Structure formats: structure tokens, C-alpha cells
Amino acid sequence: MNKTLMLVICDFLLLSMLALARFDPPEENSQPALDATASSATAEAELIELLEESLQAEQGSRENLSSDLQETRETLQEKARQLEEREAALTETLATLEKTSAEAEALTQAKAEAEAIRAELAAEREQLAQRFEATRQELQNASEERIRLANTLGSAKEERSVSEERLKQTEEALRRREAELVQREAELQAEKADKARMATEQAELNKALEVAQTERRLLSENLNKEQQEKLEAFARADRLTDNVGVLGQGVSELGQGVNQLGQGVSQIGQGVNQLGREVTTLSQSSEAIKKEIEAARPQTMSEIFTRFQKNRATIRFNSREQGLFGGTVERSYESRSILVNGPDDTVYLVTHSSNSPFSLSKSSSLESVSLTVTTGAGSLSVNQIGFLAADPRLIFIPLPKIYVENSGLETFPLALQPERWEEAVLIKNDESNFGRTEFRRLTSSARFLRMERPALGELFSDFAASRGDLAFTKNSQFIGLLTDTRYAVVIEDFVASAILNLGNRFEPDAARSTVDKMKDRVRQLPEDVR
């Protein structure tokens, strides 16, 4: 039998016995001795009184017993409830014990498996120790080999450094050579245009020569008539010679006075010449100061935009590209720019690569590309372009001096210190709008400016900066182009990171390789402006 159940039964029996038992002290009522001589009435009265007392005692005992029975019943109910709780706890304990037994068996099995694994690990540890020793020996040999290779690598690095320096010098010389070739090509184009113009002028000169020959013939006839009249005049002069001899002496004396007067006039002329040179120098200095003051004078946005409109040039790329479905598509890219004076006195045009077939933000398969620049002097075919070294997303186009001079357009100088101004004037490259904004120099690079967002009151203004906008200082000097809506490149020079040939010399593979290299160069720019 279950021990817990036996204990509960024993507790119940003990409580029952305690409930039924009476522990009242015995009553010590003295029993009167019967008197044989008492009367029967007295005896009956006493008996009745005794029976009443017994009845009352029995009733009190019954009431006490009922009260004790009620308490015992309540106690038994409480014990039953506790018994149920103990049975539930016992059941839970048995379940826990069974679970613990199962876990103990699993633990024993896991211990056995762990012992087996420990044995395997010991064997593997022995093997690993052997391998470690072999590896240590190999590592020592490799370390010795690494030292030898490090020495060899140091020599190779020195040779590579020298080779890279030579390569940089060669690339720099090559870029200069390509820039010279671009300049010469442009000059050749301009010379061809001049040759055609000279041919036209030659035809006009031939016509003028025929007219001049006719006039010469008429003049020759008039000259013959004049020569005859001259001979007649000489004859008349001979007759007057005699009279002139008489007046010769007076004229000689008059000549001496004239000579003295001439010396005085000569001295006065030298002083006048010296004064004229000083006046010329002063005038040149005054003109230079005037130009400097005029260049430093802030201009309004409308003045700068008007100057842009009067001196703009149109850049048009025509390309033939492969379409999405294998066909050939012809596209045209057009933008406007101004003529910018470079540090080497060469004039350039600048535009964003997104306004050309060579956009770095997309991939396209080009078959042919041509470029035409249009100004007041006419159209010019350009066969080479350069990607700016400061930011390859910008493209610059060199122009020949003859073409610039014939265009009659005004050139814009570079703003070498744009931070002297707190605001920049921005002009859309399609001339659709213009405005101004504050800017700050980028902390990570002086070649970039961050255009500040407009204040809260200007959020709904008509002008919003965008990629490809031209940036000017307030004195109308050219800063550079915006690469996106917030950052502008400060152009200090026109050094090319790569050069592409266009027109008949365009090579699709070379163009594709160059664009990929320019994408890699953009990834090396500061993170904020990529």
C-alpha cells in the first residue's frame, strides 16, 4: 500500500477518535442516603428532579456533541481538500520522477556517447598533435620562404615605383601631346574654314584687280597728258630761272634762320614725345585699374544671365547606338555653354556627361559619335573631347583661337577664389531659368562646393538647382558645373583624365573602355559627391 495513503487514513481515524471521546471531569454530586423512614412523595420528587437534571445534562451533551461534530465535519472537509492537493502534488511528483528517470536514462546514454566521443577526440588530438608538428615545420619553412620573398618583393616594389613614376611621366607627356593634337586639329579645321574664306576673298580680289587694271589704263593716259603739260611747265621754269638766281641770296639767309628755328622745334618735340610716353603709361595703368575695379564689381543675376545669353555656344552630339531589341537608333544630345579661358590661354567649352552619349550613369553600345559646336562664327566639327581630371563626369572641349576670334564672343575667366563670395549665380544650361544660392566649401575636398538648400520662405520659388547647371560668382567669373542638385565642381584647370576621338576616328571599344575607367575614377571621389 502507498505510504502516503496509509498516513492519510491513520490521520482520519485519529481525528475521529478524538472527536468522539469525552474528556469532561466526572461530576461529584453526593448521593443522599435513603432514609427508610422518608415518605414516598419526597422520594418521587427527588427522582423527578434527578431525571430533569439528567435530561438537561444529556441535552447539553448533545448540543456539545453537535457542535463538535460540525467542527469535525469542517475539519474533515479541510483534510479532504488537503488530501486532494497532496494527491495532485503526488501525481505531479510521480510525473516529474518519471520524466527525471527518462532524463537520467538519456543522460546516461549521452554520457556513454560523450565517453566514446572523448575517446575519438583523444585519438584525433593525437593525430592533430602530429599534424601540428608537421604544420609547424612547414610554417617555419614557409616563414623562411616569406622572408626571402619579402626581400624579393621589396626590390620588385622599388622597381615598380620607378616604373610607375616613368609611366606617370609618359602618361602626362601623352596627355599633353594629345591636347596639342586636339589644338592642332582644331586649328587645322579653322585654317580650312579660313582657306575657304580666302578663296572667296581671292575671287573678289580678282574682280577688284580687273577694275584696278582698267583704272590704271585710264590713269596712264592721264599721266601722258600730265607729262606733256609738265614739259611745257619745265620750259616756262627755265625762263624763270634767271629771275630765281637773283632771289637766291635772300633765300639762303632766310634758310639759316629757319634752321635755328628747326633746332628749337626739335627740342620742343622731344619734350612732347617724353610727355606723350608718360601720358600713355599713365593711361595704360589707369585702364588696368579700371578693368580690375570693373571685374571686382558685383553684378546682378540679370546682368550675368544677359551676358550668358549673348556669349553662349551650342554643343550638339549626334550618335548612332544599338537599341534594346538589336536595332540601330540615332540620338541627339544638345546643351549650351560659354567660352571659358583656361590657364594656358586656350578657350574651352564645358558640359556634363549626361548631356552626351558618354553618360556615366547608364550603359549604351555606341557605334559612332560626332560633335558640332555652333556660335556666331558658324558651326565647327570637333574630333576630340576630354574628361576632366577633377571630376570625370564633366566633359571639356578645346576650341582653336582663330575660331574664337572670328566668333566675336566674349570669354569668361575662371574663378580661382570662389570662396571670396558667399553666393553663386546658377544658370540652366538650356537657358530656361536662373537664380542664386549660398554655398560652402566641402570639408573633404577644396575642389567641390555644397550649395545650401533654400530657406523656408524660398521653398516654393521658381528656381531649383539641378545637374548640369552653370555656376558663376557675383562678379561674373565661371566657377564650374553642378554634378547633382547640391554639389558643384570648382574648375581650376583643364587637365584630362582621358581623351576620346570622335567623328571618323571614333572607336567603339576604346570609348567603352574609357567610360568604364571614368566610372572607376568617380568611385574614388569623396563619398558625399559621388
Image: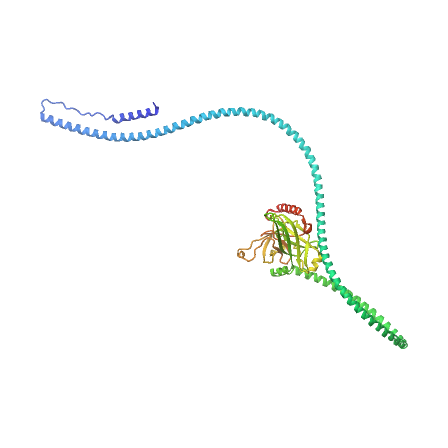
| Residue 298 visible within the image | no
| Residue 273 visible within the image | yes
Residue 77 position within the rendered picture, expressed as x and y whole percent measured from the top left: 29, 31
Q: Quadrant of residue 455?
A: bottom right
Residue 129 position within the rendered picture, expressed as x and y whole percent measured from the top left: 59, 26
In the figure, is residue 176 to the left or right of 8? right
Q: Is residue 100 above or below residue 220?
A: above
Task: Identify the coloring.
Answer: rainbow
Residue 12 position within the rendered picture, expressed as x and y whole percent measured from the top left: 29, 26
Please state which of residues 298 and 467 is positioned toward the viewer in this rendering: 467
Please state which of residues 156 and 263 is positioned toward the viewer in this rendering: 156
Q: Is residue 407 above or below residue 246?
A: above
Residue 521 position within the rendered picture, expressed as x and y whole percent measured from the top left: 64, 46
Please state which of residues 495 and 16 is positioned toward the viewer in this rendering: 495
Residue under the image location 40 percent in, 28 percent down: 96
Q: Quadrant of residue 246?
A: bottom right
Q: How many marks?
A: 0
Image quarter in which the N terminus is found: top left
Please state which of residues 10 and 197 is positioned toward the viewer in this rendering: 197
